[in-house]
């Protein structure tokens, strides 16, 4: 199994360009969710990126001219924060549950989860968490959990295709459906999960993660 580094990518970080390039490959070229002509520079971005926290999974290989190892982004996810734009899930779906009791500044949305083609195919084909692809997803989930806890975010929105909530439930990562399924880049359904509940139900993944060298560097 490869060793990945998980890193929070600031808006000024040169690696943000690599994150957006990976998103372009996944969402424009491979899945066809977004139109390539809308992103002529080969970087997939939208109006929510400036209100998001971005994370990258990185592998290091080879050496640059100065002797440093080259960094390659092989996975990414973003945490969208509350803003005047509202959350994408609120724009696209009707909710069947009343969530008015939640404080908007304590809610985030998981978005733009993308793995390079090799790892994405591996994860879908084997559906195994004990694999390189599984470690990628685990690490990105830890990033989201740590950032949410540090920011006081209590709940996370997510839009998911059929089967993914079941797969997450196998890891005791539970999300509740909050609206009907609809056509949205394929059939998708809106969900919400409580951060503390997700963390407490999955101690082998989350408890003690602040002491993990690879993840403690995220903050």
Image (spheres, helix red, strand yellow):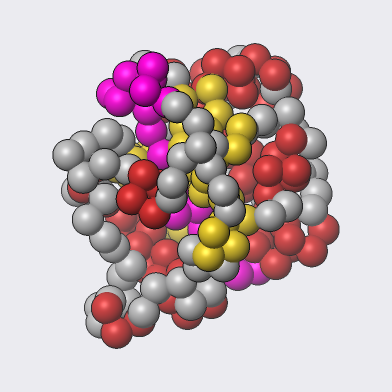
Q: Could you say which quadrant of the image residue 112 lies in?
A: bottom left
Tell whether position 30 is magenta: no
Q: Which of 161 and 178 is in front in this view?
A: 178
**Would residue 186 appear left or right of 19 to someone viewing this image?**
right
Q: In this view, does 170 lie to the left or right of 8?
A: right
In this rendering, the answer to whether 113 lies above or below 208 is below
User: Does any portion of residue 21 appear in the rendered image?
Assistant: yes
Q: Where is residue 34 in the image (x, y as percent from the top left)?
A: 39, 73
Q: In this view, does 213 lie above or below 8?
A: above
Residue in the picture at 54% in, 22% down? 194
Residue 83 appears at what percent x and percent y? 21, 37
Query: At 46% across and 58% down in the image, what residue appears?
Result: 73
Which quadrant of the view contains residue 188?
bottom right
Residue 115 counted in the magenta span: yes
166 left or right, relative to 108: right
Q: In which quarter of the image is residue 150?
A: top left
User: What is the span of residues highlighted in magenta in the rendered image?
Assistant: 99-118
Q: Looking at the picture, how far across and down is residue 138, in whole percent?
A: 63, 39
Quarter of the image with the C terminus is top left
Number of numbered labels in the structure image: 0
Closer to the camera in the image, 160 or 99:
99
98 above or below 20?
above
Residue toward you, 93 or 205: 93
- Image location of residue 120, percent across then percent down: 65, 63
Q: Can residue 66 be seen in this view?
A: no
Q: Which residue does the image show at 70% across and 22% down from the upper left?
A: 202
> What residue is drawn where x is 72% and y is 57%?
123
């Amino acid at each position: 199994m490869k060793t990945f580094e998980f890193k929070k990518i600031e808006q000024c970080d040169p690696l943000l360009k690599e994150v957006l390039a990976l998103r372009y490959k996944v969402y424009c070229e491979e899945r066809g969710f977004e139109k390539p002509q809308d992103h002529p520079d080969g970087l997939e971005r939208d109006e929510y990126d400036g209100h998001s926290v971005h994370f990258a999974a990185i592998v290091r290989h080879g050496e640059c001219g100065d002797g440093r190892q080259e960094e390659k982004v092989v996975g990414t996810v973003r945490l969208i924060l509350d803003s005047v734009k509202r959350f994408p899930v609120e724009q696209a779906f009707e909710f069947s549950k009343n969530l008015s009791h939640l404080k908007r500044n304590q809610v985030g949305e998981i978005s733009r989860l993308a793995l390079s083609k090799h790892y994405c195919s591996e994860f879908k084909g084997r559906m195994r968490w004990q694999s390189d692809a599984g470690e990628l997803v685990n690490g990105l989930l830890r990033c989201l959990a740590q950032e949410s806890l540090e920011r006081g975010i209590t709940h996370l929105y997510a839009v998911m295709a059929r089967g993914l909530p079941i797969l997450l439930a196998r890891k005791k990562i539970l999300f509740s459906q909050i609206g009907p399924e609809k056509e949205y880049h394929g059939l998708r359904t809106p969900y919400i999960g409580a951060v503390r509940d997700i963390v407490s139900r999955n101690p082998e993944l989350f408890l003690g993660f602040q002491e993990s060298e690879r993840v403690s560097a995220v903050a």
